[in-house]
Image: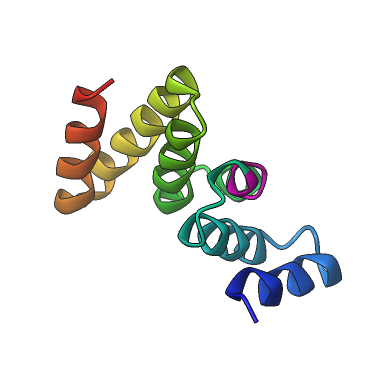
Amino acid sequence: MARSEIFRRHVAADPANPLFRFSLGQALWTEGDAAGAVEHLRLAAASKADWMMPRILLGKSLLAAGDRAGAQAAFADALALAVAQGHEEPEAELRALLATL
């Protein structure tokens, strides 16, 4: 069974749970369904203003789905959080991603 199927069940049982949404988005991304991941990652990112990881993965998913402007916005939001929270590796990754756009 695909990992995303496990998290689809969790989301179906508790659609408002941002951790389930993030986990489903992450699983879909890993399985190659970037477009399918976007909705879940947007909801996860919107659930907490300081949650960096869904924004990074949202940007990657949007970029893979062809939405460069959306990806740039998500990466910029994530970069601001990475800097504010002192996360050096994500900061470097985000700066590199933004440089490609």
Q: Quadrant of the N terminus?
A: bottom right
Q: Quadrant of the C terminus?
A: top left
Between residue 84 and residue 97, name the one nearer to us.
97
Q: Quadrant of residue 59?
A: top left
What is the chief secondary structure element of the magenta stretch?
A: helix
Between residue 30 and residue 82, name the one nearer to us.
30
Q: Position of residue 42 (x, y in %)?
A: 61, 41
* Residue span colored magenta: 36-40
Which colouring convention does the figure follow?
A: rainbow
In-image side of 84 versus 42 (left or right): left
Q: Quadrant of residue 39?
A: top right
Q: Quadrant of residue 17?
A: bottom right
Q: Is residue 61 above or below residue 7?
A: above
The outermost residue toward the bottom is: 1
Residue at figure coordinates x 29%, y 36% from the top left: 79
Residue at figure coordinates x 20%, y 43% from the top left: 93
Q: Position of residue 24 (x, y in %)?
A: 62, 62
Residue at figure coordinates x 40%, y 48% from the top left: 52
Q: Is residue 29 above or below residue 17?
A: above
The outermost residue toward the right is: 13
Q: Is residue 68 magenta?
A: no
In-image side of 11 versus 72 (left or right): right
Q: Is residue 1 above or below residue 96?
A: below
Q: Position of residue 56 (x, y in %)?
A: 39, 44
In-image side of 89 versus 5 (left or right): left
Q: Position of residue 64 (x, y in %)?
A: 45, 36
Residue at figure coordinates x 19%, y 32% from the top left: 95
In-image side of 40 versus 94 (left or right): right
**Image label count:** 0
